[in-house]
Every structure is written in C-alpha cells, then in structure tokens.
Image (cartoon, helix red, strand yellow):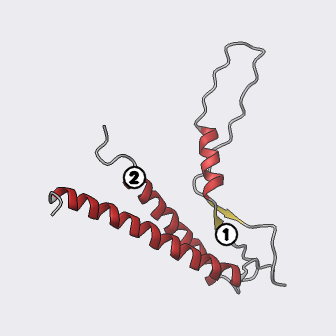
C-alpha cells in the first residue's frame, strides 16, 4: 500500500510538464527574430500515446498472427513546428500565440502549485490531529 497514493507524483509530473513548457515558450520568444528558427511546442498527448504504444508487448504464438511494429519512444514531448512560417526570414514564431501560451501555462502552473499546497496542508492537519 502506498502512503500517499499517486497524487503527489501526478502533481510533480504536472509541475515538470509546466516547467518544460515554460522553457520552450521562453526559447521561442528569445528566438523570435532569429532567421530560420522553427518554433517548438510541448505536446503531452503525443508523448503519452507513444508511451502507451511502447508499453505493449506482443508475442506471436502462430506464424499467421500479425506482427506489431513498435515505434521508438520519444524522449521528450518537445516537437518542432516545421509546417509554419510567419516571417519572410523563415522564422515560425508567432509572438501573439507565444504570449497567450505563456499566460495559459502560468495559470496552469499556479493551479497545480495551489493544489499541491492544499495536499500538504491537509497532511499537516492530519499530523497535528485536526488542530
């Protein structure tokens, strides 16, 4: 039996995701005027789906069975947006979108940090015996 279930680990992973997204957004903003720079993004769902597919282990018991083609796992959820170009110099950073993503990520981070703080306060209340 786990003492804290998976709540703290899930909240920690959410904070790590938000931190990674913050770094990527900051890099995009810093390179907004760099020629041929391609904007990057953090995609949790693509990484999650890839991990689900990589965790499936299939064993062929009959030669007529289909063989599974496993993709190599993505090391991180950071992807480059190659299909977009907003400037004549080949740069694909949209400053309005980046600033919007920055604000959204800040709200997400604050919500997760507040939830984590509430969990710690609940534990502290239990340790003190409800006092």
| Of 5 and 44, the residue lying toward us | 5
**Which residue is at a point 18% across and 60% down the rendered structure image?**
130
Q: Which residue is mark 2?
A: 7
Residue 93 - label? none
Instruction: Using residue 109 as the reference point, say whether residue 48 is left or right of it.
Output: right
Q: Image quarter for residue 77?
A: bottom right
Instruction: Using residue 129 as the reference point, say whether residue 50 is left or right of it.
Output: right
Residue 47 image offset from top left, x and y in percent: 62, 52
Q: Which residue lies most toward the top here?
A: 62
When the figure is inspected, residue 44 is found, relative to residue 86, above or below; the finding is above
**Which residue is at a point 72% across and 79% down the rendered structure image?**
93
Does residue 26 show up? Answer: no
| Of 44 and 107, the residue lying toward us | 107
Quadrant showing the N terminus = top left
Residue 38 image offset from top left, x and y in percent: 73, 73
Q: Which residue lies most toward the bottom here?
A: 33
Residues under labels 2 and 1: Cα distance? 29 Å
When the figure is inspected, residue 50 is found, relative to residue 69, above or below; the finding is below
Mark 2 nearby-residue class (10 Å; few <14, some 14–19, many ≥20): few
Instruction: Using residue 7 as the reference point, say whether residue 49 is left or right of it.
Output: right
Instruction: Using residue 131 as the reference point, say whether residue 100 is left or right of it.
Output: right
Q: Which residue is mark 1?
A: 40
Residue 29 image offset from top left, x and y in percent: 63, 82
User: Mark 2 or mark 1, which has the lower sequence index?
Assistant: 2
């Amino acid at each position: 039996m786990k003492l804290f279930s998976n709540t703290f680990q899930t909240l920690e992973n959410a904070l790590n995701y938000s931190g990674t997204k913050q770094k990527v957004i900051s890099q995009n903003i810093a390179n907004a005027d760099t020629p041929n720079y391609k904007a990057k993004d953090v995609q949790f769902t693509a990484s999650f789906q890839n991990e689900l597919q990589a965790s499936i282990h299939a064993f062929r018991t009959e030669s007529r069975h289909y063989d599974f083609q496993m993709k190599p796992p993505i090391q991180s959820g950071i992807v480059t947006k190659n299909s977009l170009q907003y400037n004549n110099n080949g740069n694909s950073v949209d400053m309005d979108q980046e600033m919007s993503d920055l604000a959204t990520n800040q709200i997400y981070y604050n919500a997760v940090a507040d939830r984590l703080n509430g969990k710690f306060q609940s534990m502290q209340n239990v340790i003190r015996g409800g006092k």
